[in-house]
Image (tube, coloured by chain):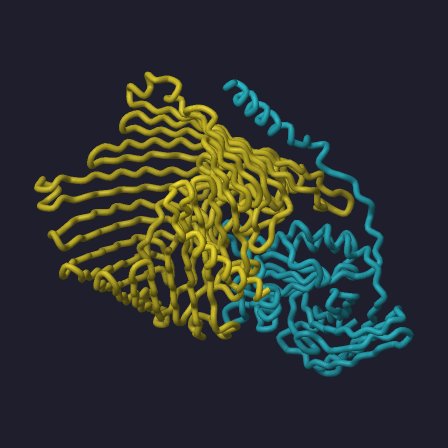
Chain colours: A cyan, B yellow
Amino acid sequence: MKRIYIYFFIALFVFCSCNNISEDERLIDIPSAIIKRNVLVEEFTGQRCINCPNAANTLHDIQKNYSSNNVIVVSIHGGNLAVANSSKTVGFRTKLADLYYNNYNKPLLPSAIINKQGGVLPQAQWASEIYNKLQEETNTNIILNCTIKNSTLSIATTIKYNDETKQNAKLQLWLVEDSVVAPQQFPNNIIKKDYLHNNILREAINGTSGQDIVLEHNKDNIYNNKIDINTAYNKNNLHVVAFVYNNNGVLQVSKLKINK
Amino acid sequence: MKNIFCLTLCFLFYLNYIFAQENNNDNKKVDVLGSIQTDILIPQKDKYLGIDTIEHHFLTNTYIDVNATSKYFDAGIRAEYMVNPLPGFDSDFSGWGIPHFYLKGKLKNIDLTLGHFYEQFGSGFILRTYEERSLGIDNALLGARLKVLPFNGVNITLLTGKQRRYWKINKSTISGANIELNLEQWFKNLQKHNTYLTFGASFVNKYESDETILVDQKYKLNLPKNVSAIDVRLQLQHKSINILAEYAYKSQDPTQGNNYIYRNGYVAMLSASYSKKRMSVLLQAKRSVNMDFRSKRSEVGLASTINNLPAFTTTHTYALAALYPYATHPEGEWAYQAMASYSFKKHSALGGRYGTKIKFNASHVVGIKTNYLGSKGSNGYGSAFWQWGNSTFYQDLNLTIEKPLSKRTLLYFIYMKQIYNETIVKGEGSTLHNHIFIVDLKHKISKHNTIRIETQYLHSKEENGKWAFALSEMSFAPHFAFSLSDLYNIGNPHSHYYQAFAIYAVGAHRLQVGYGKTRAGYNCASGVCRYIPATKGFTLSYNFNF
């Protein structure tokens, strides 16, 4: 009778090793994504976050797979691992970034929210979430037009809405900058002083949560906004990210270089 | 929801009243025990601490436990309230409700628990569910557990359930079995020679449904739905010697934490101790590789842990010794610990008039050597068993001398040399080399009054690395105690972290009120650490055990 316990445990040990998957069975084919819309990725990052460069590479690879116009990334440098700008260090932490970071309950870095749906996600889930979101239908399309006079940027946002049901939403415009050289921390105590940062959230052009809009069918809804460009920014590397959203998430997103 | 909460509280007090009625018949006697614990912070702004805004003016973690025990049944319930919790807890920690309840039936050699329960197999390498309020950890299982003692010297546990994650239950199912054989019960010669031999074996399986984790545009991972772990251990106790050897193995477990590699995990530990009158020695070593085991693949942080790997480091209580605590590195580490203590007799040359006790501890933790094999979907890395990695994660050499100076005066002197790799533990920073000196003097002024004074100094070559700490504490037994302390970062004028407390205790009640500032840092227990941001403000803690 006592032996039965021993046999039982030996069986459990054998079961343990049967769970392993051989190397040639670990990947499953998936069909290519049928892109029906653009996707917004709000990435929470920081110059002192050692795993964030790897996460940035992940997003870069995803953008290469689909297109940076289909997968639009905005990097929000908020929280204690972000670095504020000073006379000694180029930093990207701002009150605006901290506000968004706090709004999502100070997530662990790196993390991102895709189309303002499904909560803040760790890095491993971004690819599958973006894959799914790209294939979702939308009734909304955004066309951007930018002009610069002196240092004032004027943005005309045209929203085309293809649904009979009128609905309220918000339009958010962000000013985002690419190709800024600044320090970045890496694993093993390495700091790269000449790291190239992209997708940096600089300004909220029309308020921290955007402006209220009404989406109406068969009516081109045009919204005009202006912003004075901070002289510290490089105009050649700036672009505007515009997205329409409501309580169900982002309906559509678009981006445009300001001097295009 | 508030009505349900109030009704539940009323029910708890009613339960207490009903069960408090004793019967002359012992078989029907029910004991009711419980506790109330509340910690409150009323925060203030402080520009030097970086506290620019106050989101909520009243923060609290509050727990109410009631447990009833009788000959055949136990039952318990816990209510928690942390809608605006104390700073530093995970965002999902916020909430309130009844997250813990259980009913246990006991008959002869069997007991069956339904509801929430905590359990540990062996040293916890493959299963340890527990509650640690200071860390915000409560990973209890909700399900069923059966404990059986079928024969003398045989203990069996079977369990299944789903794990608590803050205010939700994870979807995966955890099942396990454990057997402990006390071999001296079968081989009587062992007992005759004061030898006790225990063999233990455990098995845990996690079943988690599939999810989509893309490798790239074309492929997703074939994730194992079952992840299993086994643990075997042998413990020998002979007179003053105790030896424990334990090994645990985990099957493929691709998770967010290990970047979805398919490498197996294991931990091997050997521990030996010797304890005799006035002397004790402990030596232990542990190697762990890829043994982070969670009930949710995508989880990071403190939640959803199924197991626990203890850190082979001393848990310090003195402020500067605890300034840089170590957390077990789940990816892998080699950890060693040696501890020895000796009490010199009274009136001996080294013991002096009142005796002296000396304790020495050495802890050393290094990384494992790895060779890269691939990323997501691969085996990740290889690692030879006996080889160390290049990084020292943590080292702690400390000497404690406990010396009564008189019948009323007790002196502690501690010296500690510490190496602390900030990047490994906190994710950023350099390697610190600290020397810490602590003097703790306690003097009994009268029958009821005691004074204690602590001074501490931390010397470090790193910038802003020097610290000083002083504390004075007066207690007027049995009811009152007062303390005043200051932690100061030498050379940094705005870094005085002062605190003042007043404590009142009567019967089972304890009330503590305080005011002060605390620096940002880490609170650790059992190798697990939680980041706590800097705070300033009034605090209140109340504990009542009934």
Q: Position of residue B543 (x, y in %)?
A: 37, 60
Q: Quadrant of the N terminus of chain B?
A: bottom right
Q: Position of residue A68 (x, y in %)?
A: 76, 59
Q: Judge from the rendering whether residue B347 lies leftward or rightward of residue A175; answer left or right.
A: left
Residue B281 occupies which quadrant of the picture? top left
Q: Position of residue A82 (x, y in %)?
A: 55, 64
Q: Quadrant of the C terminus of chain B?
A: bottom left
Q: Taking the image as drawn, is residue B382 in sight?
A: no
Q: Position of residue B247 (x, y in %)?
A: 47, 30
Residue B185 occupies which quadrant of the picture? top left
Q: Taking the image as drawn, is residue B488 in sight?
A: yes
Which residue is located at x 22 percent, y 61 percent? Answer: B477
Q: Judge from the rendering whether residue B118 lies leftward or rightward of residue A179; answer left or right.
A: left
Which residue is located at x 69 percent, y 77 percent? Answer: A205
Q: Work out whether residue A111 or residue B535 is closer to the camera in this orientation and state it.
A: B535
Classify A4 as above or below B510.
Answer: above
Q: Work out whether residue B20 or residue B280 is closer to the camera in this orientation and state it.
A: B20
Q: Judge from the rendering whether residue B20 lies leftward or rightward of residue A69; answer left or right.
A: left
Which residue is located at x 49 percent, y 54 percent? Answer: B78
